[in-house]
Amino acid sequence: MEKLIITACLTGAEVTREQQPNLPLTPDEIAEAAYQCYLAGASMIHVHARDKEGNPTQDYAVYKEIKEKTEAKCNIIFQPSTGGATWHTPEQRMQPIELSPEMATLSMGTCNFADDVFMNTEANIRIFANRMNELGVKPELECFEKGMIDTAVRMAKKGIIKSPMHFDFVLGVPGAMGGELRDLLYMVESIPAGSTWTVAGVGRYQLPLNIAAIMLGGHARTGFEDNIYYKKGEIATSNAQLVERVARISREMGREVATPDEARVILGLK
Ligand code: KMH
Ligand code: ZN
């Protein structure tokens, strides 16, 4: 089996310091959290920027600062969000693509997102994908529902999305697909042969779905964007604590953890 790629989703757009006192918010804090996750076994970071007040921002300059500060510390793969927060405009959301990162997220459809709607029209998905193609940015295809996989496959047939595709199944968002094992299996069975995939389980689904990914040959996303607890009732002390556990379990199950350069090969980034 391929080595495991662990993605650390460090901050997200929704979590607050009140909920998670160890949440990294400033570029310095995010870069340091990225480095600690790298030391713990992560080969990629999924990044959401925050402004000086701690609110979600898609500002190019803030992402640039985070990218540069992270790259000064280690060679972890930098994957900015183009999802942002539900209230960001498509134009705001696209800004980090202009940094030409190796990867960026690309959400593949619209769904309810807790009390809000996460809006991704096909027209906008095409605009995001075209710009990523122009700049050589590989999309991580965020699929919150099985229909979003079907959209990706349709767009791949038209050449809008290049193959082999890399999927991220985001399971357990209130308003979208659940995070039971059968939900993951359905998603895994629905992607084209030759694709790679990772899974982001929200809340209590995070650890069980990470372990399922280790067993099934997929890859795992962990971190505060999706879950703030180490276990029920116990707030995690850092993103690295969550990464370290996934790395440890994977190694104990006989699956080694990929370095950033090994992850680049698995994902076709180099
Ligand atoms: N914050 C969510 C509304 C992504 O990063 O690409 C969208 C999200 C997806 O987190
Ligand atoms: Zn995100």
Image (cartoon, helix red, strand yellow):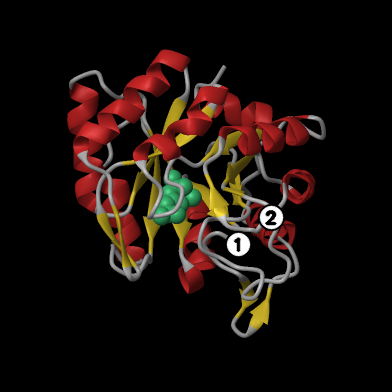
Q: Does dot 2 land on a helix, a strand or a loop?
A: loop
Residue tagged 2: 25
Q: Between residues 1 and 157, which one lies in front from this camera angle?
A: 157
**Residue 243 coordinates in the image, percent (x, y):** 67, 55
Mark closer to the observer (1, 2): 2
Amino acid type of the residue tagged 1 in the rendering: Phe
For the C terminus, which image quadrant? Answer: top right
What is the residue that sits farthest to the front in this orientation?
53
In the picture, residue 258 is in which quadrant?
top right
Side of 54 relative to 132 (left or right): right
Callout 2 crowding tier (Cα within 10 Å): few <14, some 14–19, many ≥20? many
Callout 1 crowding tier (Cα within 10 Å): few <14, some 14–19, many ≥20? many
Q: Residue at x 60, y 31 (%)?
A: 263
Q: Residue at x 23, y 51 (%)?
A: 146
- Give the label on residue 224, or none: 1
Q: Does dot 1 land on a helix, a strand or a loop?
A: loop
**Residue 47 coordinates in the image, percent (x, y):** 59, 44
Vertical placement of residue 49 versus 174, above or below: above
In the picture, residue 225 is in which quadrant?
bottom right
Side of 149 relative to 199 (left or right): left
